[in-house]
Image (cartoon, rainbow, N blue to C red):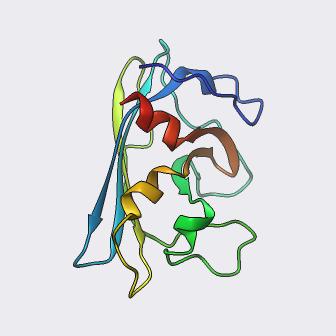
């Protein structure tokens, strides 16, 4: 499966990334929405962070989900940000996409207490996966387009 989307910055390697699978799970006992995502690097070179700044802590690559308005209304959000960001409860990856390989990422976000969990999985796909390198957006994937291809 190949998805061609427009990169948002001048990041010259963004088109070498494709989402090959996405699954969502509701962890009822904890009130968590979990995304399990596989991203493939189709190029012959590793995809790693190019972000540099004068500080000591390298930000590296980060994968996040930006919710649509309906999903955002059911999720705990980060307060004090001009961006709509769901409250992240956990995430994992190895931070680099080796050449020609598929890597797994998982993201977990907190659902508001008392929210009816029916329909959350459908709303979860009506969102956007964002790949960041430091503070720069590398690529955005509308998840509903990816789910249609699976």
Most extreme residue toward the left is 29
Does residue 24 show up? yes
- Name the residue rendered at 61%, 46% in the picture: 132
Q: Is residue 35 above or below residue 47?
A: below
Most extreme residue toward the bottom is 114
The quarter of the picture where residue 1 lies is top left
The C terminus is located in which quarter?
top left
- Name the residue rendered at 51%, 28% in the picture: 47
Q: Is residue 5 above or below residue 57?
A: above
Q: Is residue 59 left or right of residue 97?
A: right
- Depth order, front residue of 146/98: 146
> Looking at the picture, how far across and down is residue 144, in whole percent?
50, 42
Q: Is residue 74 left or right of residue 4?
A: left
> Looking at the picture, how far across and down is residue 65, in whole percent?
53, 54
Does residue 51 show up? no
Q: Is residue 118 above or below residue 45?
A: below
> Looking at the picture, how far across and down is residue 61, in whole percent?
54, 44
> Looking at the picture, how far across and down is residue 142, in whole percent?
57, 41
Q: Is residue 105 above or below residue 98?
A: below
- Depth order, front residue of 80/133: 80
Number of numbered discs overlaid on the protein picture: 0
- Name the residue rendered at 34%, 60% in the picture: 34
- Name the residue rendered at 50%, 43% in the picture: 143
- Depth order, front residue of 113/85: 113
Q: Is residue 132 left or right of residue 33?
A: right
């Amino acid at each position: 499966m190949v998805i061609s989307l427009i990169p948002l910055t001048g990041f010259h390697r963004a088109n070498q990334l494709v989402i090959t699978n996405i699954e969502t799970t509701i962890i009822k006992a904890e009130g968590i929405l979990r995304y399990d995502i596989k991203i493939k690097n189709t190029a012959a070179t590793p995809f790693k962070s190019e972000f540099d700044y004068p500080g000591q802590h390298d930000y590296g690559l980060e994968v996040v989900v930006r919710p649509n308005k309906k999903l955002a209304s059911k999720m705990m959000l980060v307060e004090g940000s001009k961006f709509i960001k769901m409250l992240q409860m956990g995430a994992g990856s190895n931070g680099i996409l080796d050449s020609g390989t598929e890597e797994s990422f998982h993201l977990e976000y907190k659902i508001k207490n008392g929210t009816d969990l029916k329909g959350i999985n459908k709303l979860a796909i009506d969102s956007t996966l964002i790949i960041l390198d430091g503070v720069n957006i590398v690529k955005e994937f509308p998840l509903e387009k990816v789910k249609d291809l699976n």
